[in-house]
Image (cartoon, rainbow, N blue to C red):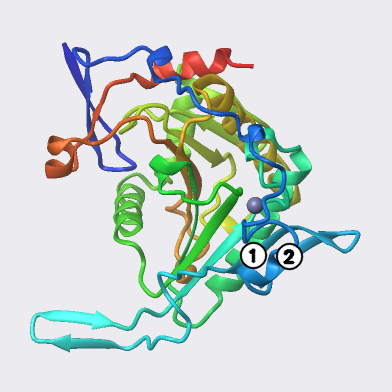
Amino acid sequence: MSELRYSIATGDWVIFSKARARRPHDFVQSKKDAAALPEHSASCPFCPGNEAKSGASLFQLTDKGAWKVRSVPNTFPALSPDERIDRKTDGFYTSMGGFGHHEVIVESPRHNTSIALMSDGEVEDIIRVYLSRYITLQAVPGIEAVTIFKNHGPMAGCSMAHPHSQIVATPVVPPHLRGRIALAVNYYEINGSCVYCRMIEGELKAGTRILAETEKFIAFLPFASPFPFIVWILPRRHMSNFSDMDEAEIRDLARTLKHILGKLYRGLGDPDFNLTIRSCPAKAKENSFFHWYLIVIPRLSQPGGFEMGTMMPINTSMPEEGAEFLRQVK
Ligand SMILES: [Zn+2]
Ligand SMILES: [Zn+2]
């Protein structure tokens, strides 16, 4: 017996395979604690004392003259502000210069920490730097979308142990986000409401996939999760753009994110994961149809040929079981 589930917000059909089902415990990783690394590494460009190796700060928060979180240019940028932005068309094909911005946000002066292990105040500082860079970059002429993301661990594409996130500002809206927005617009035109606001109501009513309910945010494993233990964190208030958070929401998001990443860290043995923020593009900032959210994708399974060929995921873990498992983690 298998089950297919459809998400009206993502347009995904997901196969939940009972024959391939794995218990939540089967996903627990056995790997070294981040705290087992040295607190400072002489060869790490992100450690204090090595700032010259990572470039001058584009923005930083400081305490008593020492930086706490800093944003620096990516040494190997995917896009550059020096490139041209105009498009070239040659018959059927269109190209443009690799214009954009690519920064690294160094999350802590400590080499051997992780958001799951930080204080609420330290996570709040990271969110504040995310916000500051997001607001600056989305105002840059020619920038259409700003994506904040984090790769944690080698399976997630991370080669540097020092805790860091990245931010990429692109001259086009990423096609995946464009697809999500099109679905949200369509839902709004038919139903006159935001599909994500309706999803929040539905998840609160069902209750079985909820991981956290705070005053300002809600976290859950979505009904049609494409991969095991995916977590969505959404603001309860309808808000299209990440930069529209108020002070109370910034503090609440920091606590909620630390809470969720702490559950993954302790419950699943510090799994590799990607984190990203999906927010409305710069030019369509506040609107009634799109609702920004943060998504955490643990990298616990590898897509096979069917998934790569069809982009239709086969998930071996039911979100209700995953949520039940993570709710028990203290
Ligand atoms: Zn370091
Ligand atoms: Zn909404």
Tell me whether circle 2 and circle 1 mark residues in contact (CB < 8 Å). Answer: yes
User: Which is more toward the observer, 83 or 285?
Assistant: 83
Q: Residue 53, located in which quarter of the rendered image?
A: bottom right
Type of amino acid at the residue the image marks with label 1: Ser
Which percent across, then down, holds residue 288? 47, 55
The residue singled out by tag 2 in the image is 60
Q: Quadrant of the C terminus?
A: top right
Observer able to see residue 289:
yes
Mark 2 CB within 8 Å of ligand 1? no
The residue singled out by tag 1 in the image is 71
Left-right relation of 5 to 33: left
Type of amino acid at the residue the image marks with label 2: Gln
> In the image, is residue 155 above or below residue 16?
below
First in sequence, mark 2 or 1: give its number: 2
- Distance of mark 2 from mark 1, alpha carbons? 6 Å
Which percent across, then down, holds residue 59? 70, 69
Q: Residue 299, located in which quarter of the rendered image?
A: top left
- SS for tag 2? strand
Residue farthest to the front, as pictured? 42
- Residue drawn at 40 percent across, 30 percent down: 222
